[in-house]
């Protein structure tokens, strides 16, 4: 048995936030119907094909041109049999198409409807377009330093897209649980900017408690990236814990740093961050990556090599944890890598069941399930509604 077996979800979204949300739910057993425009489909298929194939496994593709009344009637019939709708239009877009929450709630009062948009359904920015870089900028995320010697930068990971996908999935599960108790569906207004702002708040204590407008107290001289003699990089995670600092100094054979009055506590080390960071940089330049690897391993010091994507995907730990899998994709004629659902569940494990679908691969199957005859389906094809 899978955790969400029997839950049916309609996915009207494209690109990443909505598809990542429904991917998580599909991995847990939900049946996800990905509604796509005939012929073109989710434009991630052509714009970012790698992204599409990562975010759309375990789903069924149904092509419907929702601008046509006949296709809309098919959609409404599908809504009668489903539990959740996920959409990613700009506010008002779903309503214009006739697939907004109020319209669908009249068809299925128990429907849970999640709208994922840039800035939410209310507020002065609600109609503005946006991408991850904009949300990182607006929320203050881009102002947060991550290294001593470098200015703040944007994250290379689409943190707003992914955080909103996760929180949308979390909210959908909460709404499904609430529906079990009340019998009522509900509307979920998910803002990508809001979701990232929630994450940013956990780096905002400098502002909240000390009224300082730059988050730096998490940046420490020994909590950084260092380059070795042969040009490799290692990450060191020695922060406030004194036992890590003491063990590091012993391992580096620099125990004199333990008695240096500038570095006697974490607060002092941060206060004198530039001088200590400069010392550490020179120390790490003195040995090769292999030498540091042998010295640091087994000492209880938090460190890790800075790996490329290829190296990460070949890492024996992730392979042993079954975090890397493969699936055959008919459209490509070959296997592609997949990173499966990351949580190991002892009773209801997630599964990688089916490959990302071709455009409209399951249209006939779903129409037949809904009770459409061959003649009905032929008529829909003639109208180019499917």
Image (cartoon, rainbow, N blue to C red):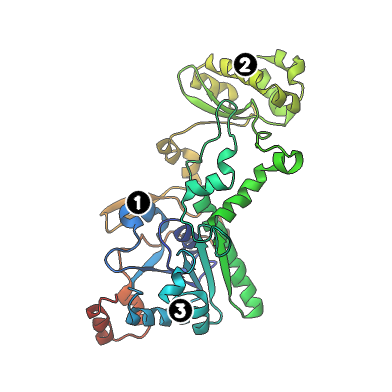
Left or right for 246, reference 286: right
Q: Are marks 2 and 1 in contact (CB under 8 Å)?
A: no
Mark pair 2, 1: CA separation? 44 Å
Q: Look at the numbered disc 2 and give the secondary structure of its residue.
A: helix
x%, y% of residue 350? 50, 60
Query: At x 49% / y 53%, what residue is drawn?
Result: 161
Q: Residue furthest front?
A: 124
Mark pair 3, 1: CA separation? 29 Å
- Quarter assignment of residue 79: bottom left
3 or 1: tag closer to the N-terminus: 1
Q: Residue furthest left?
A: 382
Tell me: residue 27, above or below residue 197.
below
Please indicate, yes or no, whether residue 373 appears anywhere in the rendered image. yes
Q: Look at the numbered disc 1 and give the secondary structure of its residue.
A: loop
Q: Nearer the viewer, residue 351 or 178?
A: 178
Label 1: how many residues lie within 10 Å, few (<14), some (14-19) or many (20+)?
Answer: few
The quadrant of the picture occupied by the C terminus is bottom left
Query: At x 43% / y 73%, what residue is drawn?
Result: 96
Q: Which residue is mark 1?
A: 48
Q: Which residue is mark 2?
A: 279
Q: Which residue is mark 3?
A: 79
Q: Are marks 3 and 1 in contact (CB under 8 Å)?
A: no
2 or 3: tag closer to the N-terminus: 3
Query: At x 77% / y 21%, what residue is drawn?
Result: 264
Q: Looking at the rendered structure, which numbered label has been put on residue 146?
A: none
Tell me: residue 248, above or below residue 379.
above
Q: Look at the numbered disc 3 and give the secondary structure of its residue.
A: helix
Label 3: how many residues lie within 10 Å, few (<14), some (14-19) or many (20+)?
Answer: many
Mark pair 2, 3: CA separation? 63 Å
Query: At x 47% / y 63%, what residue is drawn?
Result: 22
x%, y% of residue 208? 73, 44
Please indicate, yes or no, whether residue 342 appears anywhere in the rendered image. no
């Amino acid at each position: 048995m899978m955790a969400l077996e029997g839950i049916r979800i309609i996915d009207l979204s494209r690109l990443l936030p909505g598809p990542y949300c429904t991917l998580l739910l599909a991995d847990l057993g939900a049946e996800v119907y990905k509604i796509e425009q005939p012929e073109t489909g989710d434009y991630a298929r052509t714009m970012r094909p790698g992204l599409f194939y990562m975010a759309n496994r375990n789903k069924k593709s149904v092509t419907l041109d929702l601008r046509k009344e006949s296709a809309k009637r098919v959609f409404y019939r599908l809504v009668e049999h489903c539990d959740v709708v996920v959409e990613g239009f700009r506010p008002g877009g779903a309503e214009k198409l006739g697939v907004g929450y109020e319209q669908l709630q009249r068809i299925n009062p128990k429907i849970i409807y999640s709208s994922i948009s840039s800035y939410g359904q209310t507020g002065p920015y609600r109609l503005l377009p946006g991408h991850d870089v904009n949300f990182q900028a607006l929320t203050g995320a881009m102002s947060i330093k991550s290294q001593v010697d470098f200015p703040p930068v944007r994250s290379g990971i689409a943190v707003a897209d992914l955080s909103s996908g996760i929180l949308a999935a979390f909210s959908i599960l909460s709404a499904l649980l609430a529906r079990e108790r009340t019998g009522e569906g509900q509307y979920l207004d998910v803002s990508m900017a809001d979701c990232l702002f929630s994450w940013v708040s956990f780096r905002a204590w400098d502002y909240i408690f000390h009224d300082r407008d730059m988050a730096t107290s998490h940046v420490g001289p020994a909590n950084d990236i260092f380059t070795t003699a042969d040009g490799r990089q290692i990450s060191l995670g020695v922060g406030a814990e004194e036992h890590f600092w003491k063990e590091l100094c012993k391992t580096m054979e620099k125990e004199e740093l333990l008695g240096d009055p500038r570095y006697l506590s974490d607060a002092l080390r941060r206060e004198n961050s530039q001088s200590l960071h400069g010392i550490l940089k020179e120390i790490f330049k003195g040995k090769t990556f292999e030498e540091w690897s042998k010295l640091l391993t087994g000492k209880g010091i938090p460190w890790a090599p800075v790996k490329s994507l290829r190296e990460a995907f070949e890492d024996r730990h992730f392979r042993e944890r079954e975090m890397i899998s493969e699936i055959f994709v008919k459209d490509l004629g070959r296997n592609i890598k997949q990173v499966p659902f990351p949580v190991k569940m002892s009773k209801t494990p997630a599964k990688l069941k089916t490959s990302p679908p071709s455009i409209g691969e399951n249209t006939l199957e779903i129409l037949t399930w809904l009770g459409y005859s061959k003649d009905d389906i032929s008529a829909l094809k003639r109208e180019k509604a499917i």
